[in-house]
Amino acid sequence: MRFPKSSDAALNALLQSRFPAAQAAGSVFALPGSSGQSLRLEWAGVPLVARRDIGNLQSGVSLRRHYRALKRLAPGLGPKPYALGNGWLVSEFIRGEVVETLADAGELAALLYTLHQHRRFGWRIQLLPLLMSYWQQSDPARRTPLWLRTLQRLRAQGEPRPLRLAPLHMDLHAGNMVRSAGQLRLIDWEYAGDGDVALEIAAASLDEHQRQTLIGDYAQRAALDARQLGLQVACWRPWTMVLMAGWYERHFWQTRDSQFITLANDAWNRLKNN
C-alpha cells in the first residue's frame, strides 16, 4: 500500500499494530468532503475509513472523543471503531447507499429514538464556546453587527435547560446516513455528545415542515408532549442557525472557498427571517 503523504507512515504503523498478520491490499483515496483528511482503504480485506488528526483546525472535534463515542454505540447504529493512535482514527467503512435525502419522518424518528435510548457518552455538548470560537476564527470583515448581537443575546440568555438528556449525533444530514442491508446507519460522529433531544431535532438539516412532522413522530415514540417538544426545538433554533452560519464562516476563512460564503449568507438570511 502506498500513502499520499508523509504522515501516512504513522497510519501504516497503526494498521500493522491492529492487524499484525495482515498484508495491505486495495486502493487508498480521500473521501468526498473530507479535504483529504479522511481516507477510504482496504486492509486485510476489511473496508476501513481512516481519519487524520487535524489538531485545532476544527473546533469542537477530537479524535479521542470520536473514538470513545463509536466505542459506546450499540451495534448497528454507526461504524465499528478499530484503532486510535499515531494521529489517526480507524473505523469500519459501512458498505451501502448514502441516502440522497433525509429519511421520512417516521423512519428518522425511530432512528433518533433508538440512539437517544442508549447510555450517554459522558461529555456534554456546549454550544456557546463553539459559537465564540467560530466568531474569533472567522474573517474579521465578515463579523457583522447581526452576528455580534445574536451572540450577545444568546450568551445573556444561556443555553435552554434540557428537556431530556441523551446521547446525540449532532450532524444529521443526508450525507451522514447510509442504508446498509435495509437498515439506516449514521456515520461521522465527531460532533457527538450528550445533550437535549430537542437540540438534535433543531440542528438536523430539515425544512420547517419536515422538522414539525419529525417533532410529532418523535414525541409520540418518546412519550413527550408534542407541543412542549416543539417549543423546546424553537428555543434551540437560533443557537443551531448561528452554529451553522459560524461553521461556514470559519471554513471560508480557512479555505477561501466562495461556496462557504454563499452557504453562510443563506444561513444568516434564515436567522433574520426566523
Image (cartoon, grey):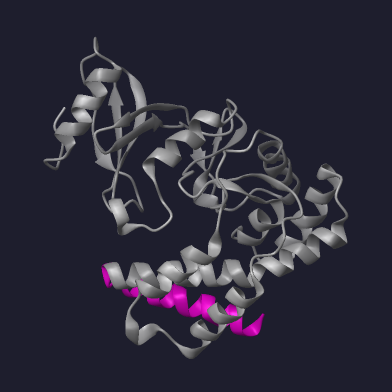
| Quadrant into which the C terminus falls | bottom right
Instruction: Name the residue furthest bottom.
Output: 145
- Residue 89: image location, x then y, percent: 34, 35
Q: Main secondary structure of the magenta part?
A: helix
- Residue 221: image location, x then y, percent: 82, 43
Q: Decide if residue 20 is on the left or right side of residue 118.
A: left
| Quadrant into which the N terminus falls | top left
Instruction: Name the residue furthest left.
Output: 6
Magenta region: 255-274
**In percent of the image, x 37 and y 41: which residue is there?**
63
- Check if residue 217 falls in the magenta segment: no
Give the image quarter of residue 179: top right
Q: Decide if residue 194 is on the left or right side of residue 4.
A: right
- Residue 125: image location, x then y, percent: 56, 53
**In percent of the image, x 14 and y 41: which residue is there?**
4
Residue 111 against residue 208 in the figure, above or below: above
Residue 96 against residue 103 in the figure, above or below: above
Q: Decide if residue 129 is on the left or right side of residue 36.
A: right
- Residue 151: image location, x then y, percent: 54, 78
Q: Decide if residue 160 is on the left or right side of residue 75.
A: right
Taking depth in this image into account, of 272 and 122 the one nearest to the observer is 122
Residue 18 against residue 147 in the figure, above or below: above
**In percent of the image, x 72 and y 63: which residue is there?**
233
Give the image quarter of residue 120: top right
